[in-house]
Image (cartoon, rainbow, N blue to C red):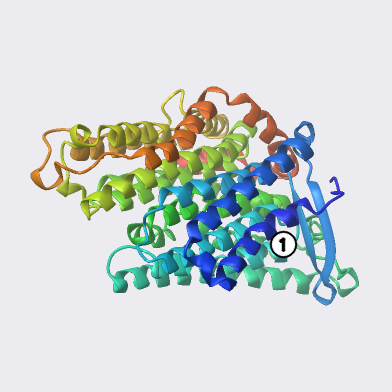
């Protein structure tokens, strides 16, 4: 752990908040809300690049760096503690990089400047919570941000979504109820931790991650498993895993494309991030015991999400279901218990964030032009909007792991690592690759090939602004696909630190590890 000389992470948390407060307090600024928010988000990106390129030591990527800590609520053991290892750093960078892309992508969404200012302010508030979640070094601070982010997201879905008001509000409420339910279960786990640890150990930094790692090791196995399950419920909903995934397609169908980019591209990664940063580090024994069940559920998500995507008629729901399948790969790589798979799961979080952002934006632009996302209303769009069609195909191929694009290396690493532990499980997971080709190529055939329909035959192709938005996303797909070694090298020490205690537990109880997993899947 390396302490920071300056509160750099706090600056990254505070800067978007300042921008949002300016938009809220100065009516004149609201009329140019997106411009103000864009300036703030670009400034945030510049500061973040300086912090993580110039101040973060990537040679020690496994350690928590830039750590800052102040006593906040000593009676409850809560401190304002921030710090990131390589995984936290790349997720913070991903979140910060996508915000200006989202703002530019939806530049002309609001005819009313006042509404534009409100939506832009909500994006900045959401950016604050994204940075805070991925840099939190105190579990209560993580939980507070985990819950608080629901407020801007609820408004962005319910008030600023697309379609009729009743449908938007219903989807926003479903999203809120699922997320709140998971958060309340997690809160129960936090209370149980406080109650089960002797009062003499209730320090003013009780909920700091490094303190909890030591304290939870002495808890009874039943208590560890109970708190582990409470955390996993919250993170499984957020991930989203089958069967608690149903809120996602409903939300994506009514949310603005930019909202879906931030929700699925970044915020849903809180689920897998929490599994790695909290569940594995605090409860390695419980994670080993629960791994067989979680790996099976992950493969079910891979297959179910892919099959559900094939059956969709709405293009935004299609993209959301593909994400259910991809999150299954991430969860599988997290719990299968091999180094390649865990590194692949972490890499997958970044690669998926880039490709799914492009998929949501391109699909959203197509739906906005036609006034519908119903794929049955389209045909021959590659002749009408050739740039949009080509970029949609490239983004989809990155999403389904075409070699040379961003999704290939992490998906291959997850499958290879799974094969090392359980061949039957790996074979079931591979079927998700075949399904992925179907759910990409069939919609492409339906929407973009053939002869154009009369009602969509004169829709405009992407303009200069929209093309400029796609440039960094497509570039990132190729860079991550071709130059993968730096990302793998940075994430490997993090995975090694997480796997070490899990391996020690598995060695002591071999009956709970790979033999049981393989035997159970075979049966």
> Does the rendering let one see residue 369?
yes
Residue 496 vs residue 237: left or right? right
Q: Residue 167: percent from the left, percent from the top?
A: 30, 70
| Secondary structure under the numbered disc 1 in the rendered image | helix
Q: Position of residue 74 (x, y in %)?
A: 85, 73
Examine the rendering and report whether any part of residue 507 can be seen.
Answer: no
Identity of the residue drawn at 35% across and 62% down: 111
Front residue (pair 194, 179): 179
Task: Identify the residue shown where x is 47% and y is 50%.
Answer: 102
How packed mark 1 is, by other alpha carbons closer than 10 Å (few <14, some 14-19, many 20 or more), is many
Q: Is residue 435 above or below residue 135?
A: above
Residue identified by numbered label 1: 139
Question: Which of these two is toward me, 404 or 191?
Answer: 404
Residue reaching furthest left?
454
User: Residue 370: x, y in percent?
Assistant: 21, 51
Q: Quadrant of residue 90?
A: top right
The quadrant holding residue 457 is top left
């Amino acid at each position: 752990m390396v302490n920071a000389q300056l509160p750099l992470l706090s600056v990254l948390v505070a800067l978007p908040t300042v921008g949002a407060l300016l938009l809220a307090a100065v009516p004149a600024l609201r009329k140019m809300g997106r411009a103000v928010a864009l300036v703030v988000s670009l400034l945030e990106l510049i500061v973040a690049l300086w912090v993580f390129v110039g101040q973060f030591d990537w040679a020690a990527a496994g350690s928590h760096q830039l750590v800052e800590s102040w006593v906040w609520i000593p009676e409850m053991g809560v401190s304002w503690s921030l710090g990131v290892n390589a995984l936290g750093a790349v997720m913070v960078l991903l979140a910060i990089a996508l915000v200006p892309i989202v703002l530019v992508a939806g530049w002309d969404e609001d005819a009313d400047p006042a509404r534009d200012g409100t939506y832009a302010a909500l994006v900045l508030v959401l950016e604050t919570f994204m940075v805070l979640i991925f840099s939190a070094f105190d579990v209560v601070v993580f939980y507070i941000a985990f819950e608080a982010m629901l407020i801007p997201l609820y408004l962005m879905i319910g008030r600023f979504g697309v379609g009729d008001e009743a449908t938007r509000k219903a989807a926003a409420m479903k999203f809120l109820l699922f997320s709140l339910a998971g958060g309340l279960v997690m809160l129960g786990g936090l209370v149980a931790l406080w109650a089960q640890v002797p009062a003499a150990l209730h320090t003013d930094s009780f909920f700091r991650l490094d303190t909890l790692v030591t304290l939870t090791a002495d808890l009874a196995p039943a208590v560890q498993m109970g708190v582990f399950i409470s955390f996993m419920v919250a993170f499984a909903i957020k991930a989203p895993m089958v069967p608690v995934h149903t809120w996602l397609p409903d939300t994506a169908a009514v949310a603005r494309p930019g909202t879906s980019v931030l929700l699925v591209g970044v915020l849903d990664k809180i689920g897998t991030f929490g599994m790695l940063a909290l569940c594995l580090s605090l409860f390695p024994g419980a994670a080993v015991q629960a791994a067989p069940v979680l790996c099976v559920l992950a493969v079910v998500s891979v297959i179910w999400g892919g099959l559900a995507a094939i059956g969709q008629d709405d293009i935004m729901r299609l993209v959301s279901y593909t994400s259910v399948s991809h999150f299954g790969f991430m969860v599988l790589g997290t719990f299968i218990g091999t180094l390649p798979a865990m590194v692949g799961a972490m890499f997958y979080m970044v690669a998926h964030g880039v490709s799914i952002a492009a998929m949501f934006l391109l699909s959203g632009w197509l739906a906005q032009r036609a006034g519908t996302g119903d794929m049955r209303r389209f045909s021959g769009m590659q002749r009408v909007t050739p740039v949009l069609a080509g970029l949609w195909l490239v983004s989809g191929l990155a999403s389904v792991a075409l070699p040379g694009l961003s999704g290939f290396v992490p998906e291959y690493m997850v499958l290879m690592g799974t094969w090392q532990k359980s061949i039957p499980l790996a074979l079931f997971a591979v079927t998700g690759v075949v399904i992925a080709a179907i759910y990409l190529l069939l919609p492409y055939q339906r929407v973009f090939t053939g002869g154009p329909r009369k009602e969509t035959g004169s829709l405009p192709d992407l303009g200069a602004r929209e093309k400029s938005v796609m440039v960094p996303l497509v570039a990132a797909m190729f860079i991550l696909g071709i130059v993968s070694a730096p990302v793998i090298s940075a994430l490997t020490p993090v995975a090694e630190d997480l796997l070490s205690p899990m391996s020690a537990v598995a060695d002591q109880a071999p009956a709970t590890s790979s033999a049981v997993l393989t035997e159970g899947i075979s049966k």
